Amino acid sequence: MIKVLRGNPTPEELAAALAVVQARAAATASAASGGAESVPEGWSDPSRIARTRGPHPGPRSWTRSYWPL
């Protein structure tokens, strides 16, 4: 049950709000019931960043710590 606490929405505004709530509820229900599994994108994979070992500590190692190796 949805209750309007403030304001006086038009029937069109109320219908739009209910459509959004119903779509969100349906998407959540399908995801919980075993819908399509989400595959992480390649850009968010941490191993993409750390493919090589970083510079070893030593004299002037700070000069080799810049991001683009």
Image: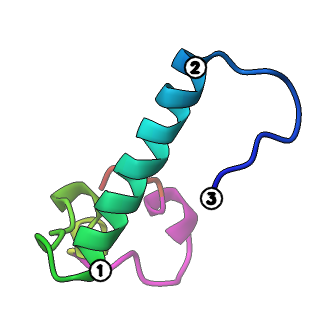
Does the magenta segment cover residue 59?
A: yes
Q: Is residue 11 left or right of residue 56?
A: right
Residue drawn 14% across the image and 73% down it: 35
Residue drawn 48% across the image and 27% down it: 16
User: What residue is shown with label 2?
Assistant: 11
Q: Quadrant of residue 34?
A: bottom left
Q: Quadrant of residue 48?
A: bottom left
Per the model, the C-alpha gap separating discs 1 and 3 is: 22 Å
The answer to whether residue 10 shows anywhere in this view is yes
Per the model, the C-alpha gap separating discs 2 and 3 is: 16 Å
Label number found at residue 69: none
Q: Is residue 57 above or below residue 1?
A: below
The quarter of the image holding the C terminus is bottom left
Q: Is residue 20 above or below residue 65?
A: above
**Marks 1 and 3 close (CB-CB < 8 Å):** no
Residue numbers of the magenta segment:
52-65
Where residue 57 sits: x, y (%)? 51, 84
Per the model, the C-alpha gap separating discs 2 and 1 is: 31 Å
User: What residue is shown with label 1?
Assistant: 32
Q: Residue furthest right?
A: 6
Q: Earlier in the sequence, mark 2 or mark 1?
A: 2
Q: Earlier in the sequence, mark 1 or mark 3?
A: 3
The quarter of the image holding the N terminus is bottom right
Residue drawn 11% across the image and 70% down it: 36
Q: Amino acid at mark 2?
A: Pro
Q: Is residue 55 above or below residue 24?
A: below
Q: Amino acid at mark 3?
A: Met
